[in-house]
Image (tube, rainbow, N blue to C red):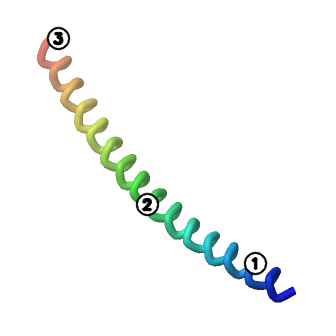
Amino acid sequence: EQDNLADAEERCDQLIKNKIQLEAKVKEMTERLEDEEEMNAELTAKKRKLEDECS
């Protein structure tokens, strides 16, 4: 029973570490997505401006 408890605690600790790592990855990916969306908006605005100048 002591071994089972130790194993369960070890699994719990590992799951907590995994959760922290995954949360950090989610934060990083969210920031990258926001940067990409901002660049996309800037490019779209530049494209429209160029289209207006050419028409």
Give the mark, 2 or 1, whose residue is nearer the N terminus: 1
Q: Which mark is residue 27?
A: 2
| Distance from Cα at disc 2 to Cα at disc 3 | 42 Å
Q: Which residue is mark 1?
A: 8
Residue type (three-letter) at the residue carrying disc 1: Ala
32 left or right, relative to 5: left
Label whose residue precedes the other's in the sequence (2 or 3): 2
Q: Is residue 40 left or right of residue 5?
A: left
Q: Gap between marks 1 and 3, in whole Å?
A: 69 Å
Give the amino acid type for the residue marked by disc 3 in the picture.
Ser
Q: Residue 12, percent across and down?
A: 68, 76
Instruction: Give residue 10's quadrant in the image.
Output: bottom right
Question: What residue appears at the point 39 percent right and 57 percent down from the top-left corner?
Answer: 28
Residue 1 appears at what percent x and percent y?
87, 86
User: Distance between the Cα atoms at labels 2 and 1?
Assistant: 28 Å
Q: Nearer the viewer, mark 2 or mark 3?
A: 2
Q: Residues within 10 Å of mark 1 (few under 14, many from 20)?
A: few
**Front residue (pair 27, 48):** 27
Mark 3 crowdedness (10 Å alpha carbons): few <14, some 14-19, many ≥20: few
Identified at 23% across, 37% down, the residue is: 42
Q: Residue at x 26, y 40 (%)?
A: 39
2 or 37: which is nearer to us? 2
Q: What residue did someone put label 3 on? A: 55
